[in-house]
Image (spheres, rainbow, N blue to C red):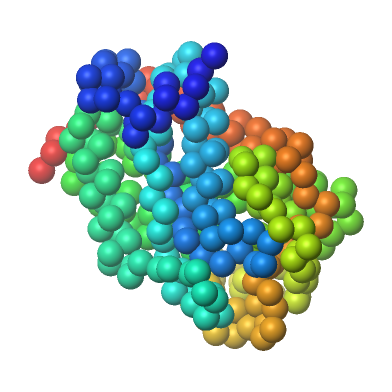
Amino acid sequence: MIGDKDVCLGMMTWPEIEARLKETDIVLVPVGATEQHAKHATTNLDTLICEGVAIAAAKAAFSSAKPVVAPAISYGYCDLPRFRDFPGTITLRPETFVNLLYDVAFGLVKMGFKKVLFINGHDANPPFITEACRRIIHDTGAFCGMGHVSELNNDAAVEVLKAHGQPLDFGHACLIETSIAQALGMEIRDEFIEANFYKPDGSPIDKLFKNAPRGFSFPAWDNEDVMDHIWGAGTGGAKGDAHGHSAELGVELIEATVAPLLDVIENLKNYAPKVTLR
C-alpha cells in the first residue's frame, strides 16, 4: 500500500529524492492559508484540505506517474475586509506571497522537477499563484499551473448542497469544507456551528452589479461592499452551513476533487517542456 512517505517530499531523505527524480518530474505544491473558519473549525483548514487532496492525488497517480508532494505553504493572502478583523487570520503581503511561491517553485525546478502544480485551498490566492506561475514559465520554461480545490469539486459540491436542501451560497467553513476537513482528521466543534446565508446564490460581482456583462470582473474579495454582503456585521465567520457534515461525505468530495487532477497528471506525464534556468 502506498503511504505518505512514498509521496511526500518532506518525509524523504535526499538520496530518496534523487532516486525519485529518475522516475518523475512532477511535483504538487499545496498552498493554503491561516485564517478564521467560523467558530467550529480551526485556522489550518485550508492548508489541511489542499495538502490532503494533493497527497490523495499523488497516491492515486503513483503507479502511473509517481508524482511527489512538496511541503505545504500554510500562509496566503487574507488581508480582506472583515477577515482581517478575526483573531487567527494571518496574511502575507502580495509581493511576499508571489515571491514565496516563485522561490519554492524555482527551487523545485532547479532540483529537477519540470512540472510544478500548485494545489490551492484558499479562494483569495489564485491571482498571486497565477503570477508566480507566469514568472516560472517565463524564467525557466518549466510547466507551472494551479489546481483550485473549490473549482475542481464545484459540480459535486452543488449536488451535495441540493441534496441537503441548502442554498448555493457556500465556500467557507460550510458543509463542503467542513466535511472534507473532517475526513482528513480535523476535529469539528459541532456545538458552535452557525449558518450564514446572508445573500444566497450568485457570484461576488452579483452582490453589487446585477446583469453585469460577460467579461467584466474586478477584485471582489478586496471590495468592502462585497464583503459586507457575504460576511455582514455580527456573523460568526462562516459562508454556508456546516450542519449535516460527515467524514463519509468528505471522502466522496475528496474523490471528486482528485479525479480531475488525475487527468491533469496523466496528461503532464509525457509532456517534455524545455527547461532552461536563467
Question: Is 122 left, or right, of 166 in this rendering?
Answer: left
> Residue 132 at what x, y percent from top left?
31, 53
Which residue is rendered at x = 60% and y = 79% of the image?
227
Q: Relative to 272, is 40 above or below? A: below
Task: Where is residue 159? Give x, y as percent.
Answer: 80, 46
Find residue 83 and report its horizontal and vertical position in percent. Answer: 54, 75
The image shows residue 67, relative to residue 228, as above or below, that is above
The front one of 232 and 12 is 12
Residue 171 quadrant: bottom right
User: Can the viewer see residue 253 in this picture?
Assistant: no
Residue 169 in the image, given as x and y percentages of width and height: 74, 64
The residue under the point 38% across, 20% down is 270
Q: Residue at 43% of width from left, 68% of height from top? A: 90
Left of 236 or right of it: where is 164? right
The mark total stands at 0
Do we see residue 37 in this rendering? yes
Q: Residue at x 27, y 25 (%)?
A: 13
Q: Quadrant of residue 246?
A: top right
Q: Residue 180 or 270: which is nearer the viewer?
A: 180
Residue 91 is left or right of residue 101, and the answer is right
Quarter placement of the N terminus:
top right
